[in-house]
Image (cartoon, rainbow, N blue to C red):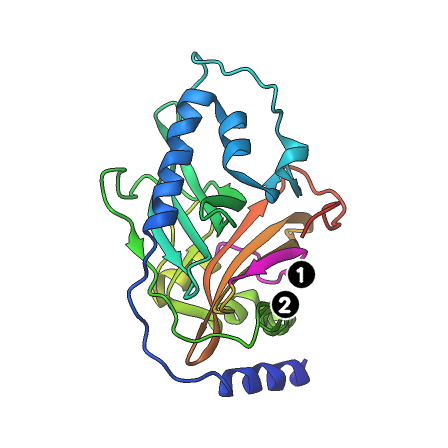
Amino acid sequence: MHRLFVIAAILFAFARPADAQPADAAPVVAAERAFAADALVLGVDASFLKWSSDDAVMIVGGASGLVRDILDPAAVFDPAAPSLVWWPTWAGMAKSGDLGFTTGAVEVGGARTGHYFTIWARQPDGGWKWVYDGGVAATSAGAPGPDVEPALLPTSVLEARSPNAAMSEVRTVEAVLAAGAERNQKQAHLSLLAPDARLYVAPLPLAVGAGAFEAALDAWPAALELSPPFGGGSSAAGDLVWTYGRALWSRDDAPGAGHYVHLWQKRSTGWVLVFAQIIDDPAAPTASPPPGGP
């Protein structure tokens, strides 16, 4: 484990100092709003399929898999069903302008039920498709409404040598996080969370800032077993990387399981965690990568 921390420190040391610049997340904010609007007209399945890439991943019912294997393209829209409404409250864009995200509040039948998180990738035709979508039941009762413009994550001005290099670097930092989380997940997360990160721990509201992080992390089990990432992706500039994988734990002698989802940004201090959540399983199936996943 000591060797992993040394490797991570080397990666941090070679990151070039730079100031953040305002993020231009307008394309992904617009895409998210159009995606949500379509769900009210086309139905949830049709809208999710319309706006997803061919290799898009969802985490549903304790399993991760390709959206095309989960949703039904022949599903009939039922206008009498409780409406699913969501809107962005925070968004960001990679330096290369090809990878972005939004997250925000979710309402079902008028009742706020949690937060969603979507990763968006620019397509060859210049349009946008989502490549990951999922959410947690962290309360959104106090979240800004849909008429409020989302806050923005400043865009990094750093980059990696290539997207593959960025993924390799992040996998190393994920290993550092996993090694620390086996002993004390709270301290492991606090050592890597950016001050302006968003942390979602259901059923609490989203946490932003050191004090809020500490309180939220106390609600997770003291120790977590985090798998290496099952998949994810990097921006072309290698400044923004998302990952997902398996999380296992034990609390009060009862096993628990879920999936973690992370968003990493390259800064002058190295790779920092700017978004983290664990999507709990309704049950605890055996962990395995999704067939055909990224």
Q: How many marks?
A: 2
Q: Position of residue 244 (x, y in %)?
A: 60, 55
x and y percent of residue 243 in the render? 58, 58
Percent across and percent down for residue 78 are 48, 13
Q: Which residue is mark 1?
A: 225
> Above or below — where is 223 with respect to 54?
below
Residue 178 badge: 2
What are the residue bounds of the magenta stretch? 219-235
Q: Is residue 134 magenta?
A: no
Disc on the earlier residue, 2 or 1: 2
Per the image, label 1 sits on a secondary structure element best described as: strand
Q: Quadrant of the N terminus?
A: bottom right
Task: Report the side of 56 relative to 47 (left or right).
Answer: right
Q: Is there CB contact under 8 Å for labels 2 and 1? A: yes
Q: Local crowd at mark 1 within 10 Å, few (<14), some, or many (≥20)? A: some
Left or right of residue 160: residue 144: left
Say which of 148 and 211 sits in front. Answer: 148
The amino acid sitting under disc 1 is: Glu
Identify the secondary structure beneath mark 2: helix
Based on the picture, tell me whether residue 220 belongs to the magenta stretch: yes
Q: Residue placed farthest to the front in the image?
A: 125
Residue at (32% x, 77% y) in the render? 19
Residue at horizontal 51 percent and vertical 62 percent from the top: 235
Camera-side residue of 116 and 156:
156
The amino acid type of the residue labelled 2 equals Ala
Pointer 2 local density, CA inside 10 Å: few below 14, some 14–19, many at least 20: many
